[in-house]
Amino acid sequence: MRPTSAFVAAVSAGVLSLAALLAAPTPLAAQALAHTQGAADRALPTEGGQAAFAAIAEIVRLLEADPTTDWSKVNLERLRLHLRDMDLVTLQSRVTSAPVAGGAVFTVRGTGETIAAIKRMTASHAAMVEMMGGPRMARTELPDGVRLVVTARSGDATSGALRIRGLGFIGLLASGDHHTMHHLMLARGEAMADHGHR
């Protein structure tokens, strides 16, 4: 018995549907395609998400673009731990301040892991500020943090003192152009004051 035209049409439609189903991308493949499809036609975000992740991603791009990178020395874990210290000091420490002649005294305290982060960050930063000709920093370790007496150098007592008090502890910690180079050096595994991270 010959198949009817309706039967042939139904079988053909089924075969085409099955072929289309087999050719369709899996949900994972479709998601990957969505990430790349049309990328050339649209502006893409420049921020890499969480701040520490974005900072590390930027360093990775620099390392990969530099043909002189010695991958046997690269240590991004060292940078990650430093960024964690920055987060702890910035967001978890408690700071009190008082004016002194020519500047201010800052008492920075924490609990748990924040204590060690405060000590690491302020030790290296105080040395860097001195080396770069910034204000004088006298640092004393406390059981739960540090005390920093920050004073302006000679000839800059009035305006320097106002600047120190205006910046406060976190502003002084963030000032200067050495941070990004410091991060790159940490990632490259270069010998330097590395806040205790190896």
Image (cartoon, rainbow, N blue to C red):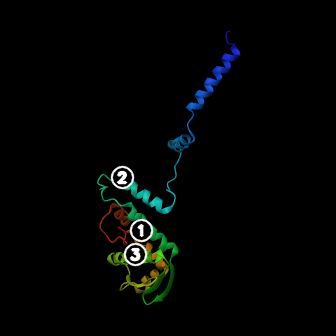
Is any part of residue 102 visible from this angle? yes
Q: Nearer the viewer, mark 3 or mark 2?
A: 3
The kind of secondary structure element at disc 1 is helix
Task: Tell me the quarter of the image containing the C terminus.
Answer: bottom left
- The x and y percentages for residue 7 are 69, 17
Which residue reaches farthest bottom? 101
Q: Residue at x 45, y 89 (%)?
A: 100
Residue 39 x, y percent position in the rendering: 51, 43
Residue at point 52% right, 43% down? 32
For disc 3, the marked residue is 120
Circles 1, 2 touching at the beta carbon (< 8 Å)? no
Judging by the rendered image, the residue that carries numbered circle 1 is: 82
Task: Report the residue marked by disc 2.
Answer: 64
Give the CA separation, mark 1 to mark 2.
Answer: 21 Å
Kindly identify the amino acid type of the residue bearing the numbered disc 3: Arg
Q: Identify the mark nearer the N-term, 1 or 2.
A: 2
